[in-house]
Amino acid sequence: MKATATAPANIAFIKYWGNKPGNLPYSDTISMNLSNCITTTTVEWDSKLKRDTLNLDGINLSGPKLERVVKHLDKIRKVLGISICAKVISKNSFLQGAGIASSASGFAALTLAAARAAGGKLSEKRLSRLARLGSGSASRSIPDGFVIWQKGSDKTSYAESIYPPDWWDLRDVIIIVTRKEKAVGSADGHKIAHTSPIFKKRVNQNLPRRTAAILKALKNKDIELLGKTIEEEALELHEVARTSTPPIEYLLEETKRIIGKLIPQWRKEGIPVYFTLDAGPNVHAILPGKYEKQLLSKIKKELPGVELIINKPGEGARLSRSHLF
Ligand code: DP6
């Protein structure tokens, strides 16, 4: 009863920020899977085990991180009708906790591997709903490519692919401003988002308008419309965080310099590159693939030695034969 799955992190063009019980978002969100930010997870259900165990990137976890996984395994046990414990070993291809949505790839891979290891063949929709319960954005790491996650009830809130990965040759060049784990996790930010005075207008007016714009931009492969909309959306996410009670500031001076000075400058110099941000200080530079080389040479000049993760649109969660144990 062992299975292994891989799943990508994803970058949201329309952000999930603020939730209702069951990790239900207030509005639809849209994302792109990241080809080079992958979690691989092996799960073995074993009746001899007395408790669930989790090893992440070579470290045996305990405390809140293990508890969160055990809680998710409880939900999977309930759905699959089993009561035994699991051994879980997981590896990230990238650094975790730096706003690169490692919870998305982590809970998506865990959900698929755990279900398969118990012999369950759940539909993509069911897997996405189940992954959502572990981490909201994990629902979007189950389907392929460009993805929309619908708001709704527990039964109707899941993610689906809008376009496959090869629909549009985009890049997400993640500029790692810091490797430090963020001080306030997303889970805490979601709880207080609604306290921001701009939250209501965001949900009722701004997000429906932006969601329509992103869908149009993806359909027409319109980088300017996509870019302008994701920049506006990223800035609003951070405005909500900054005006919540208590306020959260995720951005660093270096983040502000990259998004406020360097990216607009590179655009003026002819590269159609735009930024987005997650709940963290690292910058996601979004651009058409054919400009990748030009962007990398600018980065090399202006940000010498900076760490980058270069992503294409990626596939969703997959089963793998290469078990980690
Ligand atoms: C800013 O899915 O990480 O990246 O459900 O608590 O795990 P939990 O939150 P998470 O929140 C993601 C927040 C975001 C925006 C997004 O990815 O949509």
Image (cartoon, rainbow, N blue to C red):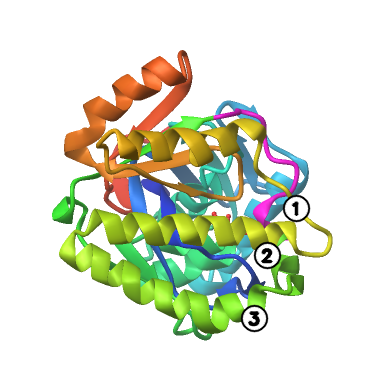
For the residues bearing labels 1 and 3, Cβ distance under 8 angstroms: no
In what element is the residue under mark 3?
helix
Calculate the distance from the C-alpha at mark 1 to the C-alpha at mark 2.
11 Å
Above or below, 125 against 186 in this view is: below
Residue closest to the far front: 268
| Range covered by the magenta-colored residues | 177-188
Residue 181 on the magenta span: yes
Can the viewer see residue 38 in this picture?
Answer: no
Find out whether the residues at labels 1 and 2 contact each other: C-beta distance under 8 Å: no
Q: Which of the pair 189/324 is nearer the observer?
A: 189
Numbered disc in front, either 2 or 3 = 3
Q: What residue type is labelled 2?
A: His
Would you say 223 lies left or right of 196 here? left
Label 1 crowd bin: few (<14), some (14–19), many (20+), radius 10 Å: many
Classify mark 1: helix, strand or loop: loop
Q: Residue at label 1?
A: 248
Q: In which quarter of the image is ligand 1?
A: bottom right
Where is residue 102? Give x, y as percent. Answer: 52, 44
Amino acid, disc 3: Lys
Q: Is mark 2 on a helix, strand or loop?
A: helix
> With 54 as the anchor, is 259 left or right in this view?
left
Report if the beta carbon of the residue with label 2 is closer than 8 angstroms to ligand 1.
Answer: yes
Q: Where is residue 89 in the image (x, y as percent from the top left)?
A: 52, 37
Q: Along the polypeptide, which appears first: circle 1 or circle 3?
A: 3
Q: Give the distance between the C-alpha atoms of the residues marked 1 and 3, in whole angstroms.
A: 18 Å
User: Is 92 displayed left or right of 58 in the figure?
Assistant: left
Quadrant position of residue 136: bottom right
Circle nearer the N terminus (2, 3): 2
Residue receiving disc 2: 190
Dominant secondary structure (helix, strand or loop) of the stretch shown in magenta: loop
Residue behind mark 3: 200
Tell me the amino acid under the disc marked 1. Ile
